Image: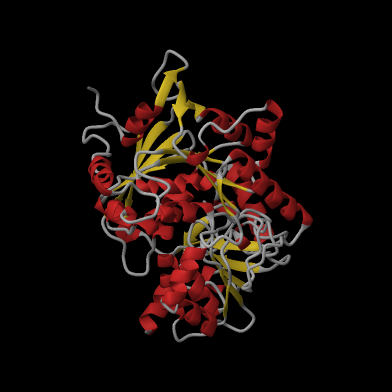
Amino acid sequence: MQARTLYDKIIDAHTVRRLDDRNGPGAEILLYIDRTVLNEYTSPQAFSGLREAGRPVWRPRAALGVVDHVNPTAARRVAAMPDAGGARQVAYFSENCRDFGIELLDVLHPLQGIEHVVAPELGFILPGMVVAAGDSHTTTYGALGALGFGIGTSDIEHYLATQTLVYRRMRTLRVVLDGLLPPGVAAKDVVMALIRRIGADGATGFSVEFAGDGIAALGVEARMTICNMAVECGARGVVMVPDEAVVAYLQGKPRVPQGALWQAAAACWQTLRSDPDAVFDREVRLAAGEIEPMITWGTSPDQAAPIGGHVPDPDGEADAGRRRDMARALAYMDLAPGLALEAIPIQRAFIGSCTNARLSDLREAAAILRGRRIAAGVRGMVVPGSSSVRRAAEAEGLDRIFREAGFEWRQSGCSLCLAMNDDVLAPGERCASSTNRNFEGRQGTGGRTHLMSPAMVAAAAVAGHLTDVRRLGRER
């Protein structure tokens, strides 16, 4: 039998029928989808289509509904939405989940949170699964050895009605992280370094497998950060080997198999890996020891640089299209070529999102903030990724560290990641952010976003400007 990648094995196991004569990259198949996670923002049209056609949901228990995009995150949790449009979305979502028999974690549910944080912590996503959902960061689940990818509204409707999707096979890209990360360098820096290297479209048409000693040494939550942001270089699906760390992470979670089924499942999961002689269509290698803390200077995740660098000059870019994009980005960000990145002041600091709001992320930021205060003129916000993360952080006293440092300690939700609620930047405000996208207006009309790791956000908040977290670490 021909050697296969992990991606190929998962796709082959879920192929219901080939829809054309080819079976390589570009071939269309009918693909079985194991699970989905729904939210109030991307699902309404899909449910409306089902209602109009009189169709039921094929397997309601394979779907989980979560309110996370439009809900407020103020310290006191309430069911009311900040605007009428958000209230209608949440009400219709609740109605749809009730009428179609789908479990819903609404705003007041003790397990509420961001979908890509909640689903893994419940054990709802398991190795070897295919997960499709109406959010591009569904790639997060690759950290568990599942193939996840985002889909559009019409595909959500098709999935809900049939448990399948028409799917086009991807080419395969392996990204190998050689060696171990130096102190002060985080998983966020790895994926930002990759995006900077291959570009915002560098993985378009590919499913990416991350491998290497550097990946194996990371915790599962750190791996989720990498898989989550891989979509920012165009990846249409991400996988990692579900090793012993993944099995340990899943053990005991509420929705995983129990007893003998657990033993059988755990043994099976650890066979899920690419064959040693499997051939990938492309390979990229990163040297872990050469990666530094990263930040973005522009309005695309690939417009990034190590913190010790400078704002680039568009005139030095040979490609006319990229030169034009750089000039527009610098105009929007109000930055001049040659400016040291560490000289850029901030007014806001945000720790949150499906990329970096898990317990390990909060611990890393709190370690920087312990015994320190954020700079005058900086507003800091911490939005845990889920209500469960919030409770766990409070049990460890992390909330006290954040509050004593001057950060607001808020309820869970997408919050300032995409400003679909009352958490927004004012025009011209500059934010150090642990989120995944720095597009124009992403955090509020006219807001300026610099992406970085949670520890780097904490360091910037203390300094009042972008800074190297390793400098603060040496001051301890």
Dividing the picture into quadrants, the one containing residue 219 is bottom left
> Is 121 drawn above or below residue 407 in the view shown?
above
**Is 337 on the left or on the right of 28, as rendered?**
right
Point out the image quarter for the N terminus: top left
**Up-down: is 26 above or below 196?**
above
Which residue is drawn at the image coordinates 24% and 42% (left, top)?
A: 264
Percent coordinates x, y for residue 285 in the rendering: 32, 46
Provide residue 46's location: percent of width, then percent of height: 64, 36
Question: Total of numbered circles in the picture?
Answer: 0
Left or right: where 323 falls relative to 307 = right
Near-viewer residue (18 or 81): 81
Q: Is residue 309 visible?
A: no
Q: Is residue 80 above or below residue 459?
A: above
The image position of residue 476, as x and y in percent, is 37, 84
Q: Nearer the viewer, residue 33 or 471?
A: 33
Residue visible at 66% across and 64% down in the picture: 72
**Visible in this render: residue 123?**
yes
Q: Residue 349 appears at what percent x and percent y?
A: 58, 71
Check the image and tell me how it is coloured: secondary structure
Residue at the spot 68% in from the left edge and 65% down from the top edge:
425
Q: Quadrant of residue 186?
A: bottom left
Q: Nearer the viewer, residue 141 or 284?
A: 141
Q: Quadrant of residue 75?
A: bottom right
